[in-house]
Image (cartoon, rainbow, N blue to C red):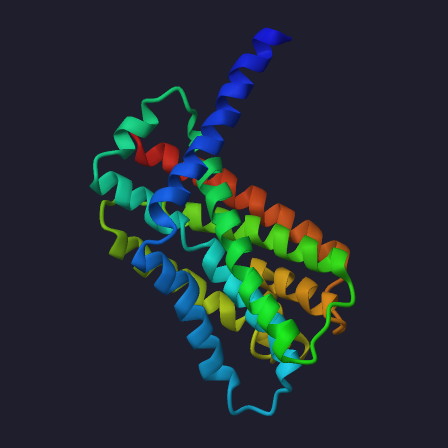
Amino acid sequence: MAAADGPLRLQLNAILAVAKKDALIYYLKAPVLIFGVVFPVCFFLSFALGRPIPPDHMVPGMLSMALFFTASAIGPLVTPWERSARTYERLVTTPASLEAILAGDVLAGTVFGLAFSLLPLALGLCATDASVTAVPLLVAGVGLGALAFAALGVLLAAPATTSPSQVMMLSALVRLPLIFISGIFVPIGEMPAWGRWAAPLSPLSYCADLVRAAFGEPPYFPPWLDLAALVAFTAGFFALARLLHGRSRR
């Protein structure tokens, strides 16, 4: 048993070490703050302001979109930066497995997303009449959503490039369309038929649905389906990231 615990403990320590490294080096990088924090707030306000939407109804959408962008902002930038700085080769030659390295990046993105999502949540609760009516749904939606979005960010970093701009272009091509089919600006039930068919393809749809339900709005999907879908997206994104990152190392 002790012999089996040794490798497992080594990989767990590697996950924490990679997450700590990402936090210390990349959290305050300008591209991370711009694309992960400033951009989603400005983007949401540009679409929401001036529309006949009560301020308290804007809170779930802003919280969901802020979480989506912040949690997925770390992954696409870490690997290209490290390839460019020639530190990625040293990282993959350590005893840490590829799964541990990717899990560390996912953990860093998850914590980053959770930390910065507290700001729109606090502002929404303090500045509007919005109130949380189901705390467990909010915790589950934000927590599982952060994991799924962070795993998506790590997946987007799979291309073997040393240019962060190329990865960010790919990231924008993936993330921006997901926003418009996820019920952030228009509830899924009010979308045209093609939008309702496309919404289940986005992990953001399920996170936003849980967050809306937590604020007392009627959900579009059953909460159990939202939870199961976020778990499935997290596992699928991570498995695909493991496959593609493994191929890019050859």
Q: Quadrant of the N terminus?
A: top right
Residue occupying the point 60% across, 67% down: 121
Q: Position of residue 172 (x, y in %)?
A: 37, 63
Image quarter of residue 40: bottom left
Q: Nearer the viewer, residue 115 or 88?
A: 115
- Residue 182 visible in the current orientation: no
Marks counted in the figure total: 0
Residue at image position (60%, 92%) is: 52
- In the depicted view, which residue is nearer to us: 168 or 70? 70
* Residue 246 place in picture, x, y as percent: 38, 32
Which residue is pictured at 60% across the width and 64% down the height?
205
Residue 147's place in the image compared with 15, above or below, is below
Q: Is residue 26 left or right of residue 44?
A: left
- Left or right: residue 40 versus residue 248 is right
Q: Residue at 31% across / 45% down in the picture? A: 159
- Who is closer to the viewer here, 146 or 246? 146
**81 sits to left or right of 192:** left
The answer to whether residue 186 is visible is: yes
Q: Is residue 30 above or below residue 108?
A: below
State which quadrant residue 114 falls in. Answer: bottom right
Q: Position of residue 137 (x, y in %)?
A: 73, 58
- Percent position (x, y) of residue 231? 64, 47
Report the quarter where the C terminus lies. Answer: top left
